[in-house]
Amino acid sequence: EIAKAEAPPPYPISARLHFLGRQLSDLAANGQPVPPEMTAEAIFRKIELVWAPAPKTAEEEQAEAKAKKKAPKPKKGEPEPPPAKPSGILLIDFPADMHEQVAFEQQLRGHFSPLLRLQNGEKDKQLRLSAALAPWWGCEG
């Protein structure tokens, strides 16, 4: 719903979620795979927005004040119940593989463990090859 808005919202978390939503919808429209890093950041930003909602605008505060005036007041001696906050977040089927796990851990911690690094890139192949060939370089002669 945030991504469908034309202009990004002024609240930084909402603006970033708006940007990510637009990118995700563009990728889905073009039939391209969604990178796990983008999915992990979108989930992280949504969780962040649930726990720290955007400040209310003046119009929202006025509407809320009108609703409070119309609502029945609690009896004397009864405290007004505070608004309920979620007690936790449940992610189902995420992360599903190692790529998603690494991306999500990086979002949560700000860094990821080198032990979880996937070694399937070109640099990683070169490192493994150089480690295998290094003992033989001194024997050339």
Image (cartoon, rainbow, N blue to C red):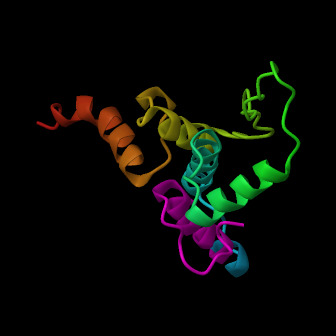
Q: Residue furthest left?
A: 141
Q: Is residue 118 visible?
A: no
Residue drawn at (77%, 33%) of the image: 90
Vertical side of 29 occupied by 106: above or below? above
Q: Is residue 131 visible?
A: yes
- Residue sitting nearer the eye, 130 or 27: 27
Residue drawn at (71%, 61%) of the image: 63
Residue drawn at (31%, 33%) of the image: 131
Residue 19 covered by magenta stretch: yes
Residue 8 place in picture, x, y as percent = 53, 72
Residue 36 place in picture, x, y as percent = 60, 52
Vertical side of 3 occupied by 50: above or below? above
Residue 78 place in picture, x, y as percent = 82, 21
107 left or right, relative to 6? left
Which image quarter is the C terminus in?
top left
Q: Residue furthest front?
A: 76
Count all numbered tags in the image, as a single digit. 0
- Residue sitting nearer the eye, 138 or 48: 48
- Residue sitting nearer the eye, 7 or 40: 7
- In the image, the segment drawn in magenta is 1-26
Quadrant hosting residue 2: bottom right
Quadrant hosting residue 88: top right
Quadrant hosting residue 22: bottom right
Residue 117 covered by magenta stretch: no
Residue drawn at (72%, 67%) of the image: 1
Vertical side of 8 occupied by 69: above or below? above
Vertical side of 83 occupied by 6: above or below? below
Residue 116 place in picture, x, y as percent = 51, 31
- Residue sitting nearer the eye, 105 or 141: 105
